[in-house]
Amino acid sequence: GENVEDEHIRCCGAVYGGMALVCSNRLGPGRIDHTYAGLLSSGVAAHAQALTTEENRAAFEDLWREVQIETVYEPSLLGGRWRKNCWNLPFNGISVAMGGITVDKIVTDEGLRRLAHLVMDETIAAANADLRKHGFGESFHLGE
C-alpha cells in the first residue's frame, strides 16, 4: 500500500521489498497459462539511518546470499514499482477491459497498441511526478 514504508520504519529500522516479473494469461475461471518466471528485483524501500546506496545494496545482498535466489538490486524501490507499472497498467488494464485478451492481441492491433502507449506515457508522467515529490533526482526518473 501507499506509504507502508513510512508506517513500518519506526518499528523495524528498515523495510525491504521486491517485485517479480511473471507472464501469465487467464484462460478462464481457475485456468492460468504461466509462460515466464522472470526477473526478481528487490531493494531497500526505507531505512531509519542514512546509509549510502552501496551500504544499502551490501546489506540487502547479505540477506539474500544464503537462499541463492538471483535478484537484481533496485536502488529505488519506488522507481522499480513505477517501472513495473509501465507494463502492468496498460497491458493488464486493456486485457481485462477487452474481455481477457492476451498481450499479442494488444500489440498487433493498431488502436489497442496506441492506447497501451498512451497509458504508458501517463504512467511515466505520474511516476516522475511521484519520484520528484519523494526527493528523487532526474537520474531516478523513468525515460520518455
Image (tube, helix red, strand yellow):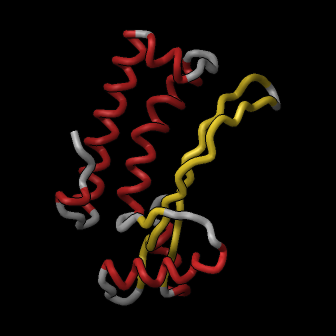
Spot the residue most to the right.
Answer: 30
Q: Is residue 112 left or right of residue 32?
A: left
Give x and y (percent) for residue 64.
Answer: 58, 76
Which of these two is toward me, 130 or 92?
92
Q: Is residue 40 left or right of residue 125?
A: right
Which of these two is toward me, 65 or 118?
65
Q: Residue 143's quadrant in the figure?
A: top left
Q: Is residue 118 above or below residue 128?
A: above
Q: Can residue 115 be seen in this snapshot?
A: yes
Q: Is residue 136 above or below residue 108?
A: below
Q: Can residue 9 be seen in this snapshot?
A: no
For image coordinates 23% across by 67% down, the residue present is 135
For image coordinates 38% across by 10% down, the residue present is 111
For image coordinates 52% across by 67% down, the residue present is 17
Q: Quadrant of the C terminus?
A: top left
Give x and y (percent) for residue 42.
Answer: 49, 65
Q: Residue 22's quadrant in the figure?
A: top right
Q: Is residue 28 left or right of residue 36?
A: right
For image coordinates 65% across by 35% down, the residue present is 35
Give x and y (percent) for residue 85.
Answer: 44, 43
Spot the residue most to the left.
Answer: 138
Give x and y (percent) for residue 34.
Answer: 69, 36
